[in-house]
């Protein structure tokens, strides 16, 4: 049987421990609000410097 070449398999050399992220202690909404505020501040700086 021929192997399926329609799916590209990317080899992973990362150690398993690399995927153990710490859990967020506060709710996701506040996290996204903070990230959004950071993104807006970065965009303001980019527009000011261009």
Image (tube, helix red, strand yellow):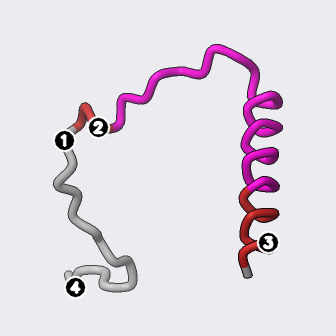
Q: Earlier in the sequence, mark 3 or mark 4?
A: 4
Name the residue tied to disc 3. 48
Residue under circle 4?
A: 2
Distance from the alpha carbon under mark 3 to that under mark 2 = 37 Å
* Residue with the mark numbered 1: 15
Name the image quarter holding the N terminus. bottom left
**Dot placed on the residue nearer the N-terminal end, 3 or 1:** 1
Percent position (x, y) of residue 34?
77, 36
At 81% across and 63% down in the image, what residue appears? 44
Q: Report the magenta residues as a range.
A: 19-41
Indicate the position of residue 47 as horizontal and vertical percent values: 80, 74
How far apart marks 1 and 4 lie (CA) works out to 31 Å
Does dot 4 land on a helix, a strand or a loop?
loop
Work out which residue is located at the far top of the displayed protein and give it: 25
Mark 1 element type: loop
Q: Residues within 10 Å of mark 1 (few under 14, many from 20)?
A: few
* Number of callouts: 4
Q: In the image, which is nearer the foreground, mark 3 or mark 1? A: 3
- Please state which of the two labelled residues, at mark 2 or mark 4, is closer to the viewer: 2
Determine which residue is flagged by label 2.
18
Relative to 3, residue 27 above or below? above
Q: Could you say where residue 36 lies in the image, as x and y percent from the top left?
A: 79, 47
User: Residue at the location (22% across, 85% down)?
Assistant: 2
Q: Which mark is residue 32?
A: none
Q: Nearer the viewer, residue 18 or 48?
A: 48
* Mark 3 → mark 1, Cα distance in angstroms: 41 Å
Mark 2 Cα shell of 10 Å, populated few (<14), some (14-19), many (≥20): few
Q: Is residue 34 left or right of residue 2?
A: right
Q: Is residue 31 magenta?
A: yes
C-alpha separation, residue under disc 3 versus residue under disc 4: 56 Å
Q: Magenta stretch containing residue 46, yes or no? A: no
């Amino acid at each position: 049987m021929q192997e399926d070449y329609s799916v590209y398999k990317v080899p992973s050399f990362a150690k398993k421990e690399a995927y153990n992220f710490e859990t967020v202690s506060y709710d996701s909404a506040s996290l996204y609000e903070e990230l959004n505020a950071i993104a807006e501040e970065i965009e303001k700086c980019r527009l000011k410097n261009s």
